[in-house]
């Protein structure tokens, strides 16, 4: 037909009708009405005829004529075209998250290896698809990235899986491009919701219930989005092993608050998932800084896969610590990494727990107790020895007349001792009440991080019988023979005392020195020995000397093990309160002195000289962790010259994963960056040589989020695959299967390279034909006697 | 006069009593703490026109205190005036007398108020007379001027003063005028204590060691109770609310039942 209409039809591979009449639509409507009228008139005039066939012939001729006339008015043409079909796009997404590292069974290859093998076995199919479609290959885990190398170079090292990111990527980058379909090579495990709600490895209480719902919402959004693309989405997925074949035990989550209060019961709950094991007793343990803290067991039941284990414990030290919940590796397990879950727990003080033990009531005792009682952050327990055996011998009324209780030294200095932050012995001689065994406990308490103060008096230091006791070993100076000097004196600040925050009661050095020179005199001093190496003396006697000829220490400090010790060799500090008020001053000096002392003793972070802080507590794998390091000099001003040694340790490992030294910048704050190589909990430890021959240490913990979340739900998400299949009409193909084709949408978009329009209405024979029809009608009408 | 007359017997007893007193003082553990200055010491508040009619009472109380408790005391009881520089060396001051005293001037009131607010304790004890006596009116006026916003009230039985060392069930004193003690309380502390039972009279001895005044209606228990109140009061001055600590509560409540 086309060949008949145009001789050049062979030069084109496509054609279509076009209408090129010059009439406006209004004109065409008028003409159409005219033709209808003409038909009506023809029919009406033919009513004179008696033969129905004659009537129909006339009407038919008029109808054909009118139709031809209408056709010619429309201007029919044929557009001849040379067209080319445009290829559709086929994006293929490869899951490179760490869960692709999982083996279905212990003997299997990893999911990633199986995916690569599938790709290799279907090389011909991919080559065919690349000829027919524009194939785009991407990797995805936390984000989507174009694949630069071949499929065989892929590594399963992504720390997170965000499946919804795929949809967003397609919507952004293939918006105006025709899609043939999509291919997802994945195990379908989405972990974004999990990572968003964990802090320092701990899942916040109350948020765990949102996890499944949030993941479901995300996958539902993905399904709706994929369906709207109106293309088949094919999933190439790992083989889903049978329930018994896949054996794994994982500490899937640890629920709890990110902080706990010192000496208060803290609780964490671990969710343990058991797959492939139908019986047995599984130990589950809680570790703190690598040391076993608590242990329990769960009994595996055949139909149960999830178990909740609760650990309650009382933290005994303030600060940040690495805790972990662990289960042993059982034979046949496909993954070892998920058998433990590390987390950071920050232990904070709700109140400072102070135990004040005094040998006798005195004004010094009274004012210190009053200060501690009035300090809202202090939880004070006092024990005063109100009467001695000598008193009882002299006067011993019935117990019912006395408001006295037994001194519970045994309970205080054994079981209850770790619950205190600070123990104060004030003018207290231990010997009448307890043995050295309890002093040993106190020394041990200090070495483990507790704080101890001994305040002077005739029952303190050597006079209290502490020579050659465990207490002497932690005190900052040697004990003398127990002598006491009764002369009034005003202690003087040492060089260290001028700068130390404990004795820094006023702003400037000179003001502070002047103040100490004006404080009320002390009523006497315990004559003790020389300060021990490593201790700091802040106040000394202006005249008296130790046996070796050095100035007699009055106030000294010492770090004993992990704890801190302060010794004040006088019992008159109350005079800095009461008597000073009488002299027209305020009791503020006394309060400041003791509050400074407490802050130093309990290691208030504000008084640490090496301070390390992380910009964020958690980083993503591949991200640079950033830290601020400040080192303070004796005057607690930023140290502007010197070196710091930086070590990074992973978890509780002793060997650093990174070590370097840096110069302190002149502005005082060193900004340090480091890129962690793996996920996990890290400890940044900074050591600085301080100008007073001391070594300062500061630490900070931080988390690098990632891989472990990928190993919690290790089964391929089969239900999700089937939903994709139903929503998009795609296929679900297992790595082990062999396929010959993938159903994709055919290309629908064409491109016109060349076209030519051939008009049909201006042909002479068409006019002749039209004229002939009208002529025949006219002839017949005349013959049959019509006008 | 017979050598064995009643008078001589009394004298002999007086000498023996003095020896006992001196011996007791010598026996005191004067291990010299940080010297006398650290030992617990009281002072008598000296006001113009007010005669110290119980000169040995406080020393006697301190002596009992150091015999019965672990507290180390100084038996000297000096006198201090409100404006004395030494006032703040003595966290407890005692005002006793039977006559009234002139109102303190504003400067003295300020200084005394500073003393009491900073941690000092003033114990006023009526020696003679009753309610509305000269001393009573003067003492109440002083308390009101010192702390106008805090009235002097009867201290409830739950007050720490009644259980700071002894559990007080009965009140003592030279006379049993009031079965209670009054006081001015600021926050959780009572810096002014006022008693009308002449406790100091019950503690007073003559120079021979005899009780200087008989207790009325009178028995040893009444005098003993007077000492117990005094010891409790000093213990309260030194330990404040120590006995209100929770650790003491169960035992004290059990014994009170």
Image (cartoon, coloured by chain):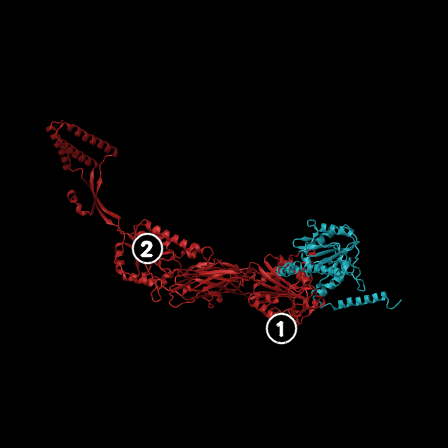
Chain colours: A red, B cyan
Q: Quadrant of the N terminus of chain B?
A: bottom right
Check the residue under mark 1 and report the chain it is in: A
Across and down, in percent, residue A574 comes to 67, 60
Q: Which residue is mark 1?
A: A468
Residue B245 visible (yes or no): yes
Q: Residues within 10 Å of mark 2 (few under 14, many from 20)?
A: some
Along the horizontal axis of the image, is A110 left or right of A501? Answer: left
Nearer-the-camera pick, B255 or A723: B255
Q: Tell if the residue under mark 2 belongs to the same chain as the one under mark 1.
A: yes
What is the quadrant of residue A594 in the picture? Answer: bottom right
Q: In what element is the residue under mark 2? A: helix
Q: Nearer the viewer, mark 2 or mark 1?
A: 2
Q: Which mark is residue A722?
A: 2
Q: Earlier in the sequence, mark 2 or mark 1?
A: 1
Q: Quadrant of the C terminus of chain B?
A: bottom right
Query: In the picture shown, does residue A779 fall above or below A217?
Result: above
Along the horizontal axis of the image, is B124 left or right of B2? Answer: left
Check the residue under mark 2 and report the chain it is in: A
Across and down, in percent, residue A189 comes to 37, 58
Instruction: Pick out the residue farthest to the left.
Output: A783
Q: Which mark is residue A283?
A: none
Residue at the spot 25% in from the left edge and 48% down from the top edge: A750
Along the horizontal axis of the image, is A9 left or right of A127? Answer: left
Across and down, in percent, residue A427 comes to 66, 66
Nearer-the-camera pick, A191 or A207: A207
């Amino acid at each position: 037909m086309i060949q008949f209409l145009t001789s050049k039809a062979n030069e084109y591979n496509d054609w279509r009708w076009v209408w090129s009449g010059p009439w406006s639509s209004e004109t065409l409507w008028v003409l159409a009405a005219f033709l209808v009228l003409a038909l009506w008139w023809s029919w009406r005039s033919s009513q004179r005829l008696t033969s129905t066939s004659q009537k129909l012939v006339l009407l038919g001729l008029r109808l054909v004529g009118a139709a031809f006339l209408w056709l010619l008015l429309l201007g029919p043409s044929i557009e001849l075209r040379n067209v080319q079909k445009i290829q559709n796009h086929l994006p293929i997404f490869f899951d490179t998250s760490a869960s692709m590292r999982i083996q279905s069974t212990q003997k299997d290859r990893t999911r990633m290896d199986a995916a690569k093998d599938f790709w290799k076995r279907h090389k011909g199919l991919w080559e065919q698809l690349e000829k027919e479609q524009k194939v785009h290959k991407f990797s995805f885990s936390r984000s989507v990235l174009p694949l630069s190398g071949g499929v065989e170079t892929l590594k399963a090292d992504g720390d997170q899986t965000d499946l919804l990111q795929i949809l967003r990527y397609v919507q952004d980058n293939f918006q105006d491009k025709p899609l043939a379909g999509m291919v997802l090579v994945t195990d379908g495990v989405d972990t974004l919701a999990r990572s968003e709600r964990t802090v320092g490895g701990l899942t916040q209480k109350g948020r765990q219930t949102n996890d499944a719902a949030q993941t479901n919402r995300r996958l539902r959004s993905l399904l709706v989005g994929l369906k709207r693309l109106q293309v088949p989405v094919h999933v190439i997925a790992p083989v889903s092993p049978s329930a018994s074949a896949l054996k794994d035990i994982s500490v899937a989550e640890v629920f709890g608050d990110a902080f706990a209060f010192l000496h208060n019961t803290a609780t964490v709950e671990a969710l343990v998932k058991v797959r492939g094991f139908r019986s047995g007793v599984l130990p589950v343990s809680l570790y703190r800084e690598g040391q076993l803290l608590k242990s329990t067991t769960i009994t595996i039941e055949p139909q149960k896969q999830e178990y909740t284990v609760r650990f309650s414990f009382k933290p005994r030290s303030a600060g940040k610590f690495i805790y972990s919940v662990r289960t042993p590796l059982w034979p046949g397990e496909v993954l070892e990494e998920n058998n433990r879950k590390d987390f950071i727990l920050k232990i904070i003080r709700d109140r400072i727990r102070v135990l004040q033990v005094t040998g006798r009531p005195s004004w010094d005792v009274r004012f210190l107790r009053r200060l501690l009682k009035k300090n809202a952050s202090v939880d004070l327990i006092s024990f005063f020895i109100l009467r001695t055996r000598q008193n009882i011998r002299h006067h011993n009324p019935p117990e019912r007349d006395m408001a006295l209780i037994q001194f519970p030294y045994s309970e205080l200095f054994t079981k209850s001792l770790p619950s205190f932050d600070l123990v104060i012995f004030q003018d207290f001689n231990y010997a009448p009440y307890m043995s050295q065994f309890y002093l040993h406990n106190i020394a041990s308490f200090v070495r483990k991080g507790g704080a101890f103060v001994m305040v002077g008096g005739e029952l303190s230091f050597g006079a209290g019988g502490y020579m050659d006791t465990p207490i002497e070993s932690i005190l900052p100076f040697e004990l003398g023979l127990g002598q006491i000097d009764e002369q009034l004196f005003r202690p003087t600040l040492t060089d260290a005392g001028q700068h130390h925050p404990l004795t820094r009661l006023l702003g400037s050095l000179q003001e502070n020195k002047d103040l100490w020179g004006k404080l009320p005199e002390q009523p006497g001093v315990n004559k003790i020995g020389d300060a021990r190496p490593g201790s700091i003396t802040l106040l000394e006697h202006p005249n008296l000397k130790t046996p070796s000829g050095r100035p007699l220490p009055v106030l000294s400090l010492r770090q004993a093990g992990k704890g801190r010790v302060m010794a004040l060799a006088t019992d008159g500090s109350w005079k800095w309160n009461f008597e000073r008020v009488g002299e027209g001053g305020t009791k503020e000096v006394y309060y400041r002195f003791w509050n400074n002392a407490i802050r130093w003793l309990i290691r208030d972070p504000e008084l640490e000289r090496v301070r390390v802080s992380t910009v964020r507590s958690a980083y993503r794998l591949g991200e640079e962790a950033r830290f601020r390091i400040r080192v303070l000099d004796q005057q607690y001003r930023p140290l502007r010259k010197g070196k710091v040694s930086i070590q990074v340790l992973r978890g509780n490992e002793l060997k650093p994963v990174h070590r370097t030294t840096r110069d302190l910048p002149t502005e005082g704050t060193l900004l340090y960056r480091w890129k962690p190589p793996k996920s996990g909990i890290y400890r940044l430890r900074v050591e600085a040589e301080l100008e007073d021959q001391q070594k300062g240490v500061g630490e900070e913990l931080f988390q690098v989020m990632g891989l472990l979340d990928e190993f919690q739900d290790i089964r391929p998400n089969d239900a999700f695959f089937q939903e994709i299949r139903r929503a998009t009409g795609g296929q679900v193909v297992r790595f082990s299967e062999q396929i010959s084709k993938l159903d994709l949408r055919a290309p629908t978009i064409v491109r016109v390279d060349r076209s030519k329009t051939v008009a049909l209405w201006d042909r002479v024979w068409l006019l002749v034909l039209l004229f002939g029809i009208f002529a025949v009608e006219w002839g017949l009408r005349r013959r049959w006697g019509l006008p | 006069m017979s050598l064995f007359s009643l008078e001589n017997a009394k004298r002999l007893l007086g000498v023996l009593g003095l020896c006992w007193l001196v011996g007791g003082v010598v026996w005191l553990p004067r291990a010299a703490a940080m010297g006398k200055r650290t030992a617990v010491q009281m002072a008598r508040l000296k006001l113009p026109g007010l005669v110290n009619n119980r000169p040995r009472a406080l020393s006697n109380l301190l002596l009992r205190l150091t015999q019965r408790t672990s507290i180390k005391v100084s038996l000297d009881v000096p006198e201090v005036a409100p404006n004395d520089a030494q006032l703040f060396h003595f966290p407890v001051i005692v005002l006793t007398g039977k006559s009234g005293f002139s109102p303190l001037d504003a400067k003295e009131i300020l200084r005394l108020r500073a003393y009491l607010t900073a941690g000092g304790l003033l114990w006023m004890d009526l020696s003679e007379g009753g309610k509305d006596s000269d001393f009573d009116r003067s003492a109440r006026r002083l308390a009101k001027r010192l702390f106008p916003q805090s009235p002097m009230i009867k201290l409830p039985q739950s007050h720490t003063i009644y259980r700071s060392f002894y559990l007080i069930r009965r009140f003592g004193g030279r006379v049993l005028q009031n079965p209670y003690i009054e006081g001015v309380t600021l926050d959780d502390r009572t810096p002014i204590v006022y008693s009308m039972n002449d406790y100091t009279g019950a503690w007073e001895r003559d120079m021979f060691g005899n009780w200087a005044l008989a207790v009325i209606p009178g028995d040893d228990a009444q005098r003993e109770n007077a000492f117990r109140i005094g010891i409790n009061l000093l213990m309260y001055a030194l330990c404040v609310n120590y006995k209100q600590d929770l650790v003491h509560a169960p035992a004290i409540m059990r014994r009170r039942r």
